[in-house]
Amino acid sequence: MDKLTFAKIEKSISPERLAAYKTDGASNETALARYIYNIELSKSLYPIINIFEVTLRNSIDNALKKFFDVQDWSDIIPLTETERRMIYEAKIKIVQRNQLYSHNQLVSELTLGFWVALMGKKYNSQKFRSFMIKNMFHDCPSGQKNSTVLQKNLAEIRFLRNRIAHHKRISHWTDLEQKHNLILDFIRWMSQDMHKIAIHNDTFETVYKNGIAPFKLFIEKDF
């Protein structure tokens, strides 16, 4: 690849973003191959992250409905100011779209950050939290079915998800395969059926094992 072509591509991506792929002194071609590889890795993780998010929020919602014995627990659940504000802002967004409020819309509107926060340390003493853990993670091994481990693992998944959502580099993580497996484990602990769907849509292993070689070949051939 000539310098002019790379300069134009670098301008489109941004020098700052592409620099993350050259920290070890990699060539322009290798940096660009790594960038494309990162896109493919992120794309391969999206389906299972999507299934994880949907399954998590609905599992929490169903557990809270059962615990409080109501169809809409949003006004009665004891929350800190932060999560209370997140519910308020989600309800405002629904109204601003000229939609009639419904609890199902609220569940869809609330972010992954909200749902992970409910599993956080600040709710350790709340009875609804222990009820959630007991009723959500049916197939979770006893050694991992405690608030400390669950909090840590959920925070890691959320961090990965946010990096993907903001198009940041994940391809250099040495434990990416373990994180992929952790997401699948969480889905399986909550729902065996959703785990089957996740497995069916999962292409991560193939992309991960092939590495950057296919993208280096693409660059050599097309540029």
Image: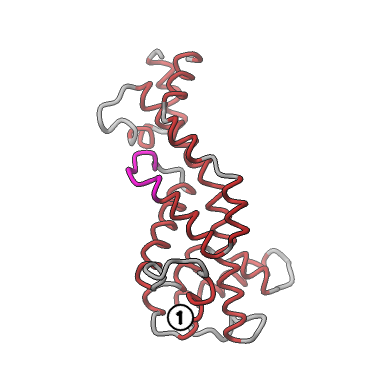
Image x and y of residue 19, in percent: 33, 33
Between 115 and 69, the one lying in front of the other is 69
Label 1 secondary element: helix
Residue drawn 29% across and 25% down? 26
Residue drawn 61% across and 69% down? 107
Question: Going by the image, does 92 lie left or right of 140?
Answer: right
Residue 75 position by quadrant: bottom right
Above or below, 65 against 89 in this view is below
Residue drawn 45% across and 32% down? 37
Residue drawn 43% across and 49% down? 163
Instruction: Look at label 1 and name its amino acid.
Output: Ser
Q: Looking at the image, what colour scheme do you see? A: secondary structure
Residue 74 position by quadrant: bottom right
> Over which residues does the magenta segment extend?
169-178
Above or below, 135 against 94 in this view is below
Image x and y of residue 51, in percent: 58, 55
Question: Going by the image, does 72 lie left or right of 135?
Answer: right
Image x and y of residue 15, in percent: 37, 32
Above or below, 203 against 212 in this view is below
Tell me the residue that label 1 is attached to.
130
Is residue 108 found inside the magenta-colored segment of the image? no
